Amino acid sequence: MGTVDLEELRRARDLMDREYARPLDVPALARTALMSTAHFSRRFREAYGETPYAHLMTRRIERAMALLRRGDISVSDACFAVGCTSLGSFSSRFTEIVGETPSAYRARDHDATRVVPSCSAMVLDRPRRDRATSSRNEEAVVTPAH
């Protein structure tokens, strides 16, 4: 993969990381990377080991985890704050990535992470994708970092 492709893919990935709460879809991200939708999806997966949609949803779930750790926001509010439009889909994806429901995650005691700077807590709590168990058509299985 050439450096031009990587630069364009990085531009799209940075957009997802920065603007995760905006309505983003793969065609719009492909336009950001100056590629066709199919080419962008293939190249993104090749470069980052996951589909653009999986990357975006992981970022959204990470941000939702941070909101839910605070304890002062409902699951519904966290869902919509991170750019998801369906509470059911959000809850399913959250459970798949984190390993527990958003309500259970919110109710869990997070006092131990409150003394850790938020940037470090985000890295420590980041879901990790197990690429060895991924299949061709499915996103990789994700295991919690803790």
Image: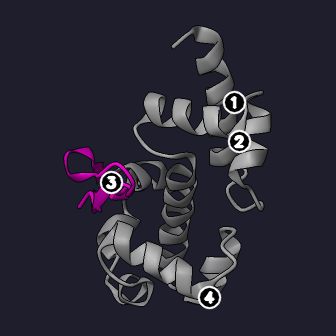
Q: Is residue 10 left or right of residue 104?
A: right
Return the x and y of residue 126 as percentages of the image width and height.
Answer: 38, 55
Q: Which residue is at the front of the view, 96 or 145?
A: 96
**The residue under label 1 is which amino acid type?**
Arg
- Taking the magenta stretch, the answer to whether it contains residue 25 is no
Question: What range of the chain is rendered magenta?
Answer: 124-146
- What is the secondary structure assignment of the residue under circle 2? helix
Q: Earlier in the sequence, mark 4 or mark 2?
A: 2
| Residue, disc 1 | 11
Q: Is residue 86 above or below residue 58?
A: below
Residue 76 bears which disc, if any? 4
| Residue, disc 3 | 140
- Taking the magenta stretch, the answer to whether it contains residue 135 is yes
Residue 15 bears which disc, if any? 2
**The residue under label 4 is which amino acid type?**
Ser
- What is the secondary structure assignment of the residue under circle 1? helix
